[in-house]
Image (cartoon, rainbow, N blue to C red):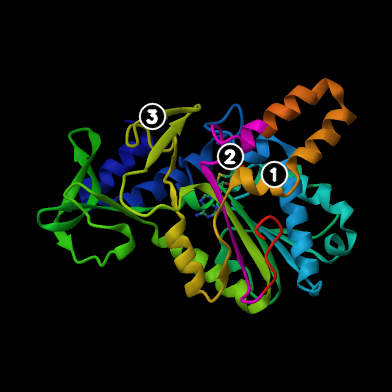
């Protein structure tokens, strides 16, 4: 067990088993040894690679998506461009560069980055130091004063928020917890069933069925949607996830681009769970917003013109043409990220459909 694992073991011995959500929070965000706090998480040298790191076109298209929506909503004053969990800052760098083509939007913007990890905040500051417009950082969404229209982007953010897991037993739903198994961490079920009311859309839970709930993601999406509904703007969430209902254990750990045991080396592997977009849409509606039908990432990027942009980049620099086309394939192909990743857009009630979602 590594030092963070030892600390978690001591906590469990002192205060009892932890819900999966608490284990996830410690493993990802512990200020000393958490995955995002302490190491190079994202990129070819990190644990995993994300869409903005694959191609500059990703950030460019999402930025122009925001600019178009802003115009469609009558160019409201003082818009805020917000990104949740900006990683290395690549998406925002590409976005701000692309927005030079939409100077009316760009010049009225305030940019806010929501980042819990001081180490990643430093990478973002470095990448955005020549942004020439006000950029500020907060650690949590709740620190942003909600007084302006907002255009919010969140790529692979919701999947990093902690989930709780419940397993159907003959006694009912029991929470899966992390406990001490000798000198290791192990999973167990809490002996006390909890009276969960599970949406009928999921179907019947047979014994062994696993129900995942991300109370953090649900509360956040509801809150953001309330801000969008009352202040104007839009939010776009892109993540590895599913729209299908049902049950299943999707918690996974990835280190150096390979799957590893979830409990073996806390802080050294990325932990994530598939985003349950059906629940996210319910949360957004609870917040009073309009939710567009869920799209696959490939469908959205193609509708926004990824292929046209790739042709422009390829002819500007023929030496990179193959690289550009491979990156586009990776982002859009159904066998790669195109279908596994989904995009959910949230707008104020009655607002025009966002580009790509018409
Ligand atoms: N969007 C980026 C990075 C995704 S990784 C990309 O596409 O490359 C998840 C990001 O969310 C990291 O920046 C991580 O530090 C941040 N993060 C994770 N949990 C968070 C939380 N609870 N609050 C704020 N930021 C968080």
Is residue 153 among the parts visible in the rendering?
A: yes
Q: Nearer the viewer, residue 319 or 259?
A: 319
Q: Nearer the viewer, residue 159 or 125?
A: 159
Disc 1 within 8 angstroms of ligand 1 (CB): no
Is 128 situated above or below 282? Answer: above
Q: Name the residue: 51% across, 41% down.
A: 340
Identify the residue under disc 2: 338
Residue 304 falls within the magenta-colored stretch: no
Residue 346 falls within the magenta-colored stretch: yes
Q: Nearer the viewer, residue 74 or 200?
A: 200
Percent of width and height locating residue 295: 57, 52
Identify the residue under disc 1: 302
Of the image marks 1 and 2, the number of the one nearer the N terminus: 1
- Dot 2: element: loop
- Dot 1: element: helix
| Mark 1 residue crowding within 10 angstroms, few (<14) / some (14–19) / many (20+) | some
Identify the residue under disc 3: 260
Is residue 120 among the parts visible in the rendering?
A: no
Q: Is residue 82 left or right of residue 178?
A: right
What span is colored magenta in the figure?
Answer: 329-350
From the image, state whether disc 3 or disc 2 is nearer to you. 2
Is 298 situated above or below 285? Answer: above
Q: CA gap, disc 1 to disc 3?
A: 33 Å
Percent of width and height locating residue 339: 54, 41
Q: CA gap, disc 3 to disc 2?
A: 24 Å
């Amino acid at each position: 067990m590594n030092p963070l694992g030892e600390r978690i073991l001591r906590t469990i011995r002192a205060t009892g088993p932890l819900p999966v959500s608490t284990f996830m929070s410690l493993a990802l965000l512990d200020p000393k040894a958490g995955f995002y706090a302490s190491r190079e998480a994202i990129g070819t040298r990190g644990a995993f690679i994300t869409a903005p790191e694959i191609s500059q076109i990703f950030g460019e298209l999402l930025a122009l998506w925001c600019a178009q929506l802003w115009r469609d909503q009558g160019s409201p004053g003082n818009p805020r461009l917000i990104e949740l969990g900006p990683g290395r800052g690549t998406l925002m760098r590409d976005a701000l560069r692309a927005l030079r083509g939409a100077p009316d939007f760009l010049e009225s913007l305030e940019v806010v980055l929501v980042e819990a990890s001081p180490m990643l905040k430093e990478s973002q500051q470095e990448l955005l130091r020549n942004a020439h417009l006000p950029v500020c950082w907060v650690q949590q969404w709740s620190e942003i004063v909600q007084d302006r229209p907002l255009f919010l982007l969140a790529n692979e953010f919701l999947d990093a928020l902690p989930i709780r897991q419940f397993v159907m037993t003959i006694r009912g739903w029991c929470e899966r917890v992390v406990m001490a198994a000798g000198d290791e961490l192990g999973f167990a079920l809490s002996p006390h069933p909890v009276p969960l009311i599970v949406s009928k859309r999921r179907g019947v839970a047979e014994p062994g069925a696993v129900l995942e709930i991300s109370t953090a993601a649900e509360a956040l999406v509801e809150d953001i949607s309330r801000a969008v509904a009352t202040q104007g703007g839009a939010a776009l969430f892109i993540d590895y996830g599913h729209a299908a209902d049902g049950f299943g254990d999707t918690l996974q750990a990835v280190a150096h681009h390979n799957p590893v045991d979830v409990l073996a080396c806390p802080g050294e592997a990325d932990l994530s769970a598939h985003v349950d977009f059906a629940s996210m849409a319910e949360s957004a509606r609870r917040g009073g917003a309009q939710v567009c039908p869920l799209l696959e990432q490939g469908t959205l990027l193609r509708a926004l013109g990824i292929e046209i942009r790739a042709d422009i980049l390829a002819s500007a620099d023929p030496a990179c043409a193959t690289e550009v086309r491979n990156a586009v394939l990776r982002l859009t192909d159904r066998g790669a990220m195109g279908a596994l990743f989904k995009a959910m857009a949230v707008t104020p009630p009655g607002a025009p459909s966002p580009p790509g979602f018409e």
